[in-house]
């Protein structure tokens, strides 16, 4: 059915929400990471970087593994080993 004339209802269009800019308050470290990933994707021309490339970006912004794995990580590894 096609709506025409003055009786036509205005349909509110869904907003396209970019996951990197959705309406959530990000912590400064999250914003730094998102900007670094966006910069990497622009420079490399790769829209979908590999996990190795993501790890490279994380290291490039200064993150290093300095703590033991969390219980969440250990639980996932234990499940995979079963």
Image: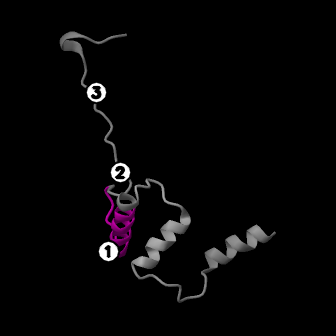
Front position in the image: 27 or 64: 64
Q: Secondary structure at mark 2?
A: loop
In this picture, is 52 found above or below 12?
below
Please give the label number shown on residue 28.
1
Front position in the image: 1 or 48: 48
Q: If the image is split into quadrants, where does the C terminus sit?
A: bottom right
Disc 2 versus disc 1: distance between alpha carbons?
Answer: 18 Å
Q: Residue at x 48, y 73 (%)?
A: 56
In this picture, is 64 found above or below 20?
below
In-image side of 9 versus 70 (left or right): left
Query: What residue range appears in magenta?
Result: 23-40
Quadrant in which residue 28 is drawn:
bottom left
Q: Residue at x 33, y 55 (%)?
A: 22
Q: Residue at x 35, y 58 (%)?
A: 42
The single residue placed furthest to the left in the displayed view is 6
Residue behind mark 3: 11
Please rate how many residues cluster around mark 2, counting C-alpha atoms within 10 Å: few if below 14, some from 14 to 19, many from 20.
few
Please rate how many residues cluster around mark 3, counting C-alpha atoms within 10 Å: few if below 14, some from 14 to 19, many from 20.
few
Indicate which label's residue lies in the foreground, 1 or 3. Answer: 1
Q: If the image is split into quadrants, where does the N terminus sit?
A: top left
Please rate how many residues cluster around mark 1, counting C-alpha atoms within 10 Å: few if below 14, some from 14 to 19, many from 20.
few
Q: Is residue 62 magenta?
A: no
């Amino acid at each position: 059915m096609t709506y025409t004339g003055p009786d036509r209802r205005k349909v509110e269009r869904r907003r396209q929400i970019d996951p990197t800019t959705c309406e959530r308050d990000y912590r400064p470290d999250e914003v730094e990471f998102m900007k670094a990933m966006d910069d990497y994707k622009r420079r490399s021309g790769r829209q979908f970087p590999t996990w190795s490339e993501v790890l490279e970006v994380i290291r490039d912004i200064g993150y290093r593994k300095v703590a033991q794995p969390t219980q969440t990580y250990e639980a996932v590894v234990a499940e995979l080993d079963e």
